Image: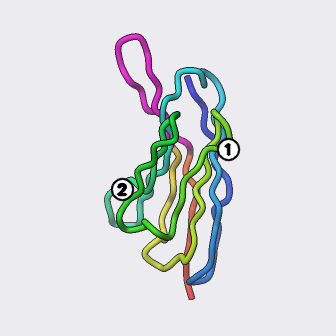
Amino acid sequence: QVQLVESGGGWVQTGGSLRLSCAASGRIFSIFALGWYRQAPGKQRELVAGITGGGITNIAAAVKGRFTISRDNATAVVLQMNNLNSEDTAVYSCYADTQGRLSVTRFWGQGTQVTVSS
C-alpha cells in the first residue's frame, strides 16, 4: 500500500499561482511514476501532469507553459501552477503508480480543491 497526502490547494485570483505538493509513504520503493489529475464540476477527470522516476514528464496541453511538475525526492511530487484561470478550478488529486510482481497499481490521494476567480 502507498499513502498519498496532498497540500497546497486553496483560492487564488485569476493570474495567480499555487503550488501543490504530494508526499508518499508506505511501499514507496515500488513507485515508478507520480502525477496529478483534476476534476472540475460536471466534467470528467483529466490528467494534468505526470513524472516518472527518471524525470520524464507528461504535461497536458491545456496547462503546458503554465504548469510544471517536479519531484522533490523519490517520494514527493510538486505541481507548480502559474497564470491560473477559472478553467483551472477543480479538485486536484495526486496519484502514484506502483509496480507489483505481476501488475501495476495506482494509488490516489484524497484530493485538494483549487479555486480560481477574479
Residue at the spot 65% in from the left edge and 61% down from the top edge = 19
Image quadrant containing the C terminus: bottom right
Residue that extends furthest to the top in the rendered view of this protein: 101
Can residue 30 be found in the magenta stretch? no
- Residue bearing mark 1: 72
Number of marks in the image?
A: 2
Determine whether, in the image, residue 7 is placed left or right of residue 106: right
Distance from the alpha carbon under mark 1 to that under mark 2: 23 Å
Mark 1 is on which residue type?
Asp
> In the image, which disc is placed on residue 46?
2
| Of the two numbered discs 1 and 2 in the rendering, the one whose residue sits closer to the viewer | 1
Residue at the spot 41% in from the left edge and 26% down from the top edge = 105
* Main SS, magenta residues: strand
Place of residue 7 in the rendered image (x, y in percent of width and height, measured from the top left): 67, 53
Q: Nearer the viewer, residue 47 or 10?
A: 47
User: In the rendered view, would you say 11 is above or below 7?
Assistant: below
Residue at the spot 44% in from the left edge and 21% down from the top edge = 99
